[in-house]
Image (cartoon, rainbow, N blue to C red):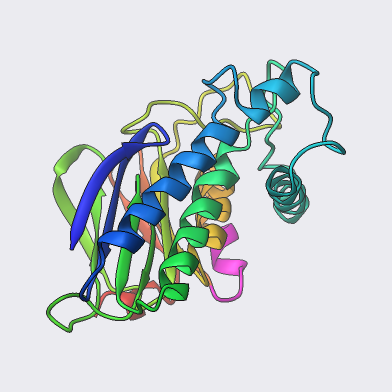
Amino acid sequence: MKETRLCMGMPIEIEIVGTDVSKPLEAAFAYLAAVDERFSTYKETSEIAQMNRGEVTLAAASEDMREVFAIAEATKQETQGYFDIRRPDGNLDPSGIVKGWAIRNTAARIQKAGYENYFVNAGGDIAMGGTNAEGKDWSVGIRNPFNTNEIVKVVYPRGKGIATSGSYIRGAHIYNPHMPEEELTDIVSITVIGPDVLEADRFATAAFAMGRQGIAFIERLPAFEGYAIGASGIATMTSGFRTYTQ
């Protein structure tokens, strides 16, 4: 059973293979809605909005918020500051962590409910397990950022997480914290495959912020592969990326 709903400001697609899947499907979307209520920077009642107004400190924040902030700080250190949840205006925006974190947690909840074959896609951040309804490996298409109706590469993550960061759908929402005033124009998308969707997501965001050096950063990360498309339309992939294309 597959269903797509608008949540967290984007269409989220969840497919669970099996019988009696309506209950875990509803539970998955309910969980994502709850995450959105806590972390949305667009909702005045959210916990992150309260923190940005100075009404809630990190020490007094929820366990989920403290966990996300800890992951964000670790990512900042691991990427030499190319990932930073503090925006140029001074506000905190952990969405670069939250999406992958929430999708990973959703996948874990589906597994805990006893379903091994599933696919969760939130705006290109994807967690999957097992096989599809036909008993085949799940496949993911990487879109052409210059023509989003075209798929330029099909990959088979085989249980790994995959995430794509880019400017071609949402515009310039990622910035280089070291030079926040400069627009990122070297690459238009970078797709990362990692141990799970959270790992893929956080490093994809940082790699995009690095510009043309991002794909080399992914190359140096153990257990990660990447595929970057430059502004000129030329794609660059890491040395092991082809293992996921067949």
Residue at image position (76%, 54%) is 74
Q: Which of 154/102 is in front?
A: 102
In the visual, does 58 lie left or right of 246? right
Q: Look at the image and tell me whether residue 225 can be seen.
A: no
Q: Which of 155/232 is in front?
A: 155
Q: Would residue 134 be counted in the magenta stretch?
A: no
How far from the left and from the top, in percent, is residue 14? 29, 57
How far from the left and from the top, in percent, is residue 128? 36, 69
Q: Is residue 179 positioned above or below 113 on the image? A: above
User: What are the residue bounds of the magenta stretch?
Assistant: 216-223
How far from the left and from the top, in percent, is residue 106? 46, 59
Quarter occupied by residue 5? top left
Residue at image position (25%, 73%) is 138
Q: Is residue 58 positioned above or below 76 on the image? A: above
Q: Would residue 218 be counted in the magenta stretch?
A: yes
* Count of numbered badges drawn on the protein: 0
In the visual, does 226 lie left or right of 131? right
Quadrant holding the N terminus: bottom left
Q: Is residue 228 positioned above or below 166 on the image? A: below
Residue at image position (15%, 76%) is 133
